[in-house]
Amino acid sequence: MEKVTIQQYLTGLGYSPPVEETYSHIAGWMEWYQNEVQKFHNYKIYDGTRLHKEKRYRLGMAKKVCEDWANLILNEKVSIKAGEYEERLNKILDANNFRVRGNQLIELAFALGTGALVEYLGADGSIVIDYVRADMIYPLSYDNGDVTECAFGSYRNYGGKECIYLQIHRLGKQGEGENPKEYYLENRIVDINSGIGLDLPGGMQPSIQTHSERPLFQIIAPNMVNNIDLDSPMGISVFANAVDQIKSCDVVYDSYVNEFILGRKRILVPITMAKVMMEEDSEKGLSKAVPEFDPAETVFYQMPADRNSDLKPTEVDMTIRASDHELGIQRALDLCSFKCGLGTRRYQFTGSGVKTATEVISDKSDLYQNLKKNEIPVKAAIIHMAQAVAFLDGKSPDLEVTVDFDDSIIEDTNTTIDRNTKLVQAGLRSKLSAIVEINKCSEEEARKELERIAEDSQITGNDIDWTNMDQENPEEEEPEDQKKKNPIGFRGGDET
């Protein structure tokens, strides 16, 4: 009996999930990400008499590229601000290990083309955030590229049976007593052999009305067109169009390593001398085997017999072409980096040193533009995730959230400070704007910082007026904010 697939089951429910071919591409990208492509990394080589199976040495650039994208976009310096709810939000994110798992999800999303954040209430009432990779995501409906309904499925062993587990996020149906504007969550476990639904484990509800008009999931994908399937809501791997360049990195690196392995001294041996010979003992009338060479010895290479009877072992001294290979590897890395959106000189095989941030700005314009472009969908996903968490926590889903990415990787902080200092001294920029850019904060926070600077200046006796922002004689009246102590009060949800 043919086993039921997730696509077949969802189609039977009346949905239109992506076709199988979409997930075959994801499986191919997974092989490159795992650095084990059977048809490429295993090959055969001829030694003069027979073929030997070999495994290709590899650089693993597919995973390296995705790691770098994740580290550039979602690192420890990314700041998520949510006003009075910020403290509570950070506790929920910490409980779900967001700083670690979020970075890993970005890496997987860039490797496999798609990733998802899913929020729901656990059995104990706690807020849970799941991090779902592409091969478990099945979009059911989408509008203008935005997925509006989605199923998250996986193959599991349940009760000794091969099963499909599905969590379906769908809008209510008209005519069935459901609100068509609200989302409903369904849990299903299906026998993969019969297609029959099984009983859910204790505590798991078959259907839940979320009372939310917004989806409690967010899809993340590299901000690039899926040129494999233009109509698919799924994204493509960041290296989907750079597989040939990744192959070239492995091919040249494999040759480079083998240059040292095969560069050992070799002795060419006629095949007749390399075989085990049978010799006759004329005195005793017996035959005995006389081994000439150890067949496992790699120093000797068997040469076919020739009409010339004077063939004898000949030494061959191989010269290693290290510099040529190193140049070839660098070119392969440059092409791979360029095709994956990281610029042309991100990876240096020579290991001459780490570039400074100023150098990064000068020759990484491609990286800067691509980074800013890829931050857009990630920023939107994080904002919607925070709003979904607030909704599940009993707060308004209209929570104002801002996400500040870490630009210190691209921008030199010292250069930014020097530029703003010169502009302020020349009267071409206000101190308020300079502090906003340098500290990456809001104008409200910058004003408070200016007030603290003014207080320090008065204490030290420096004749500097930092508060002369909007009024001609600021000393005549103390700023209203200065009179308030701790003006922002925490009004987050109950601690758990």
Image: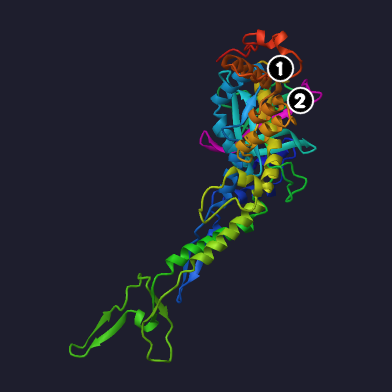
Residue 237 visible from this viewpoint: no
Label 2 neighbour load within 10 Å: few <14, some 14-19, many 20+: some
> Mark 2: which amino acid?
Gly
Query: Which residue is identified by label 2?
Result: 172
Q: Is residue 402 left or right of residue 296?
A: right
Q: Quadrant of the C terminus?
A: top right
Above or below 202: residue 487: above
User: Where does the image place residue 103, in percent across and percent down from the top left?
Assistant: 58, 36
Residue 136 visible from this viewpoint: yes
User: Where does the image place residue 92, in percent across and percent down from the top left?
Assistant: 58, 22
Residues rendered magenta in the picture: 154-181
When asked about the image quadrant of residue 378, the answer is top right
> Mark 1: which amino acid?
Ser
| Disc 1 secondary structure class | loop
Label 1 neighbour load within 10 Å: few <14, some 14-19, many 20+: few
Query: Which residue is identified by label 1?
Result: 396
- Give the number of marks: 2
